[in-house]
Amino acid sequence: MSYKLKSVSVIFLSIFIICISAVVFTACEDNTNGERQREITKMKVVLQDEPEEYMTQCYEQAVDEGEIAQVENGTGIEVVMCGSVEEQIREIEDAVNKKLDCIIIYPFKSDSVSKALNKAMKSGISVILYSERLNTPTKIIPNAGFYYDMDEFGKDNVKLFNDFYNSFKEESGYNGKLDIVAFYDSDNFIDKKLYKIFQRDIDSNLHIISQFETSSRIKAMNEFEDWLDKSDISTISNVRAIYTQSDECALGVLDAIQNYTGNAKLKIQLISSIGASKSGVENIVSAYEDLGIKQVTFNYTPVNIREAIRYGLDIISGKLSKDSVGYEKIFKIDAVSKDNVREFEKSNGYITRYSIEQED
């Protein structure tokens, strides 16, 4: 074999070796990146799995914020929904086993959850509560708490109805009792607590004549239609306000009012609800213009979980001390009515809430 041929063979052999090495290196690099992808998860967000729109949107907001964190600083955030105390405990234990840096949790009210979270804190994990204050486990001191103060909200809701009665009395000169129909979710701890506050603190001249245990639009519509069909004219005419605990329920009541074809004159002037959801907000103006009803919904928004996540990211990055405890943020639940609904629809919180495409 000539020297020239040998040289060419050596060149081809060298190229072949280089190509094989590149493939092997790339495969190793991909594997290393895969390992990195698994290792970068540093936070777990543990929510409750329930049919309420609020919690589903909390999940969507948390996932979206996690995607932002992944892009901006490479921090992975796992978001899970749990249907029971036991499931939440398993997720907390999983975070401990994986040696994550932070847990954000919307907890079930349970001492068992508290014990699991205390164990997590002792292992060095920062714990941040995101919850209604009434639903917070008491046997834990987290790094931070992001709360809705439902006692204060309960007072605001009572004030809405008491102010309504006082305005009615001033305008009409009527000093007697006015009837209310109420809808609440008896299976929900918070709803039951809020309803007790409402029953206890409303003006003594406001009389709850009937109550229904639902937060469903269809069920509320059916039950209120049935009530209207079976009640006498004087009973129906004396109902001036409706108390509900979800926008969907309020919309069901409005459906029943629009469907009513009986002989009684409906004189309902106020319907309250909770959520400030898109469907609830979009009906505020038409409820007033078409039916003469002031619909008021309270802004109980899932967007606020983003603030809790950002706080946790600051702990993970070292911007905040991991050992600092006691930070507390109370979210105010503002009322949205015909007087401020257009301004509310332009707010950053509302736009952010619906910037994520919602599933039907």
Image (cartoon, grey):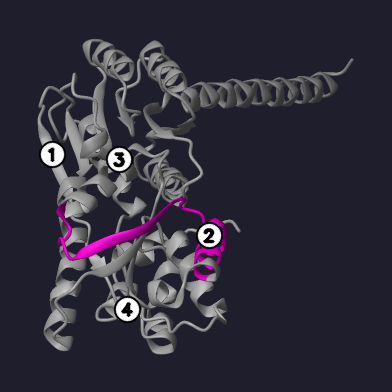
Tell me the distance, in whole angstroms, between the alpha carbons under discs 4 and 1: 38 Å
Q: Quadrant of residue 281?
A: bottom left
Give, as a three-letter code, the residue at label 1. Glu
Q: Find disc 1 in the rendering and name its residue.
A: 328
Q: Looking at the figure, which quarter contains the N terminus?
A: top right
Tag of residue 223 = 2
Return the mark for residue 309: 3
Residue beneath label 4, please?
A: 269
**Mark 2 and mark 4: Cα distance apart in space:** 19 Å
Q: What residue type is labelled 3?
A: Ile
Image position, residue 137 (x, y; %) = 24, 25
Q: Distance between the residues labelled 2 and 3?
A: 40 Å
Q: Residue at x 20, y 48 (%)?
A: 197
| Crowd class of label 1 (few under 14; some 14 to 19; many from 20; radius 10 Å) | some
Q: Determine whether label 4 and label 1 are within 8 Å by CB.
A: no
Point out the tag, 1 or 3, that comes first from the N-terminus: 3
Quadrant (top left/top right/bottom left/bottom right) for the C terminus: bottom right
Point 15% across, 71% down: residue: 163
> Between 357 and 197, which is closer to the camera in this rendering?
197
Range of residues picked out in magenta:
201-228
Neighbor class of circle 3 (other Cα within 10 Å; few <14, some 14-19, many 20+) is many
